Amino acid sequence: MGSEAPPPLPPKWASKPCIMGIDEAGRGPVLGPMVYGCLYCARSYQKTLSTLNFADSKTLKEEKREELFENLKADESIGWAVDVIDPRELSDKMLKKSKINLNEISHNSAIGLINKVLGIGVLLTEVYLDTVGDAEKYRLKLSEIFPNIKIVVAKKADSLYPVVSGASIVAKVTRDRALRDWVLDETAENLQRNFGSGYPGDPQTKDWLKDHKHSVFGFPTLVRFSWGTCTSYSKDFVEVLWESDATDEEGNGRSTKRQMKLTSVGFTTLKRKTEDIESSGKGRCKFFQARKLELLPQF
C-alpha cells in the first residue's frame, strides 16, 4: 500500500499574523484553464512587499512577469499557491443539470486556497481579493466562513494592494505556462497549436476553433465548450438523439426545456413515447437488456 505525501511544512514566519492576496487569470478566455493564485507573507513584511515592484499582471510584459515570479519564488519570506481549473471541469460544472456558474466556481477556488494555506499552519489574519460579483455579498460570504480573518474585497484590488498584485503575477504566469505547455489529448494529424491568446475576440483563436471543430465530437479538450463563443459553430454539428433523456424526463414535463438546452450546444433529444422506448429495449439499463428482462405493465 502506498502512503500519502506529508503536508508541506509551514514557513518559519507562519506563526506570526499573516496577510494573503488572491487573484485569478483566464476568467474570460475560451481556451485553457482558469487559474486562481494566492500570495501570502507575514504582516510585518508588508512594507518590504511594496518595494518588490509587483503590479497588476495585465500591465506588465511577459518577460517582466516571469522575472517577478522567479523572484518571489526565491524569496523565503513569501509563500504562494495556485488552483488550476481545467477547461473540462469549467464546462462540466456550467452545463450540468445542477449548474454552477463561473462566479461560484471562482468563490469556491478562493475558499479552497484560504483553507489550503490555513491547513499548513499559517496564521492568516487578513485576506485581500478582487471582487467577483457584488463586492459586499462576496465579503460577507467569506467572513461567515472565516470569521477570524479580516476580509477585504475591492474592485481593482490587484492595483491597490501589493499582496494581490503578487497573486495576480502568480496566477497569470501559471496560466501562460500551462497554455504554452499544454499537451493536447487528441491525436488527429491535423491538430495545430497556433491558437493565439485563447480570448474570444482574438482572430487567431477564432480561426483555430473553426479549424478544430468536429461534427460529432465537438472541440478538443482545451476548449471551454460551455462558452457562448462555441455556440456559433454548433450549426455544423451532427444532431445527437438522447433517447434515455427523453424517457427520464418525459414524465415530469421537462423534455422541452432539456431539449432547448441541448440544442444550444448542438444536441437535441428525440421525443418518443415511454412505451415505445421500453419495448425497443433501448431505454433500459444494459443489466436488464443482457438478461432479456422486460417491464411488466401489471401482475
Image (cartoon, rainbow, N blue to C red):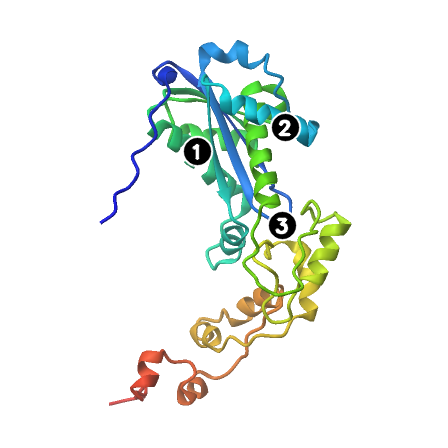
- Vertical order, 77 against 242 (above or below): above
When the figure is inspected, residue 166 is found, relative to residue 47, above or below; the finding is below
For this view, does 14 lie left or right of residue 214?
A: left
Residue 78 horizontal/vertical position (percent): 47, 20
Residue that appears at 60% across and 57% down: 225
Mark 2 element type: helix
The disc, 1 or 2, on the residue closer to the chain's N-terminal end is 2
User: Cβ–Cβ below 8 Å for labels 1 and 2?
Assistant: no
Query: Where, by quadrant of the figure, is residue 296 drawn?
Result: bottom left
Tell me the distance, in whole angstroms, between the alpha carbons under discs 1 and 3.
23 Å
Image location (x, y in percent) of residue 132: 56, 35
Q: Residue at x 74, y 47 (%)?
A: 201
Of all residues, the one furthest to the right in this rendering is 203
Please give the label number shown on residue 65.
Answer: 2
Q: Amino acid at mark 1?
A: Leu
- Mark sitting earlier along the chain (1/3): 3
Q: Which three-letter amino acid code belongs to the residue tagged 3?
A: Leu
- The residue beneath circle 1 is 113
Residue that mark 3 sits on: 31
Q: Secondary structure at mark 1?
A: helix
Disc with the residue nearer the chain's start (2 vs 3): 3
Question: Is 211 positioned to the left or the right of 138 in the image?
Answer: right
Give the label, 2 or 3, closer to the camera: 2
Tell me if mark 2 has few (under 14), some (14-19) or many (20+) residues whose alpha carbon lies within 10 angstroms of its own: many
Residue 295 seen in render: yes
The quarter of the displayed image where residue 251 is located: bottom left
Q: Circle 3 sits in a helix, a strand or a loop, which is it?
A: loop
Foreground mark, 1 or 2? Answer: 2
Distance Cα–Cα, label 2 vs label 3: 21 Å
Name the amino acid, label 2. Answer: Arg
Distance Cα–Cα, label 1 vs label 2? 22 Å
Q: Residue at x 38, y 80 (%)?
A: 284
